[in-house]
Image (spheres, rainbow, N blue to C red):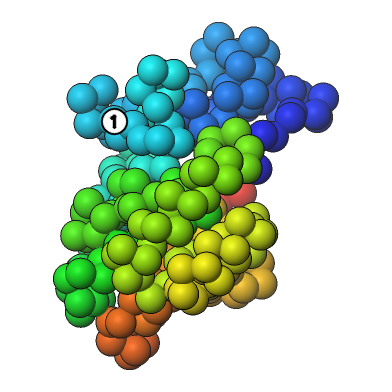
Amino acid sequence: NSHTFEPAPADAILLAQADLIIMNGLGLETQIFKLAQRVKKSSTPLLLLAERTLSKNQWIFDARFPKENRQPNPHLWLNIGYAMHYAELTRDALIALDPVNRLMYTDNTKNYLAKLRNLDAAIHTCIDGIPTDKRKLLTYHDSFAYFAPRYGMQVIGAVQPADFAQPSPKEVMQIIKQVRTAKLPAIFGSEVFPSAVLEQIARESGAVFIDALADDALPGAVDSPRHSFIGMMLNNVKIITRALGGAKQCLSGFDSEIGPGYHHASARNR
């Protein structure tokens, strides 16, 4: 887990050998970031995608990432517009590192951005099909802070703070009251982070608890087309849409495969 990951000696060796290091940034990978700064070659660029995507006045702070801690919510990539910018930044960094393969990086990024634009439009259509008063999210972790405003949703709360401590009984009761007041049909957890608290909130509020959302865990087998960022977002949006009263056929025809047109660097140029 990027919040709590403790680097091993092998990670230090890998970072010291790297020609390019790419991270999300905004404090998501604190330990790896500190280690990279210590051991990387002076010539190795350290690309922080989030810092290059948003200005400080666009950062989102919330109960789990409070402004007084100077720790903004770092989960930009669930907003497809920001994910597209991540791809463009990565393309540019790879071209700078490996200009011989400029065409490969340019073509691959062009093809991938086309799929992300289609995905973005499809998500808008799905969310628009949810009744307006049900476009609200209560989640296990505040990963959807940048997703929600792009697609016309509201995050009413997140159970797990950034340090993964348990909420107090008073906080739990406040959340239960919120869910009852909003008459939410469902609240969302993750199979990666089991939450007895969310199960309790669901029981006492009358909502259905669905523990299947993901913010960085990819679905399916490693060699499956579904095992991708697009596959993860398809799963998330299908689950959210159907649970909150949207169209059951939402995204049913969307292709999660990367698709044709991708090129690979030769072994000589890689």
Q: Tag 1, which secondary structure?
A: loop
Name the residue: 42% across, 43% down: 75
Which residue, as the protein is rendered here, is positioned at the far right? 9
- The quarter of the image holding the C terminus is top right
Seen from the viewer's position, the closer of residues 180 and 35 is 180
The answer, for residue 193, to whether it is visible in the render is yes
Q: Position of residue 188 (x, y in %)?
A: 48, 65
- Residue 222, given in percent of the width and then of the height, sits at 66, 67
**Observer-nearest residue: 21 or 161?**
161
Residue 240 on image: x %, y %? 38, 72
| x 49%, y 52%: residue | 173
Disc 1: CA contacts within 10 A as few (<14), some (14-19) or many (>=20): some
The relative height of residue 215 versus residue 64 in the rendered view (above or below) is below
The residue pinned by badge 1 equals: 59
Residue pictured at 43% horizontal, 24% vertical: 71
Q: Is residue 73 left or right of residue 200?
A: left
Q: Along the horizontal axis of the image, is 33 left or right of 178? A: right
Give the camera-side residue of 204 and 13: 204
Amino acid carrying label 1: it is: Trp
Q: Is residue 205 above or below residue 53?
A: below
Residue 23 visible in the current orientation:
no
Residue shown at 74%/23% (left/top)? 12
Q: Percent from the top left, x then y, of residue 31?
A: 64, 23
Q: Quadrant of residue 72?
A: top left
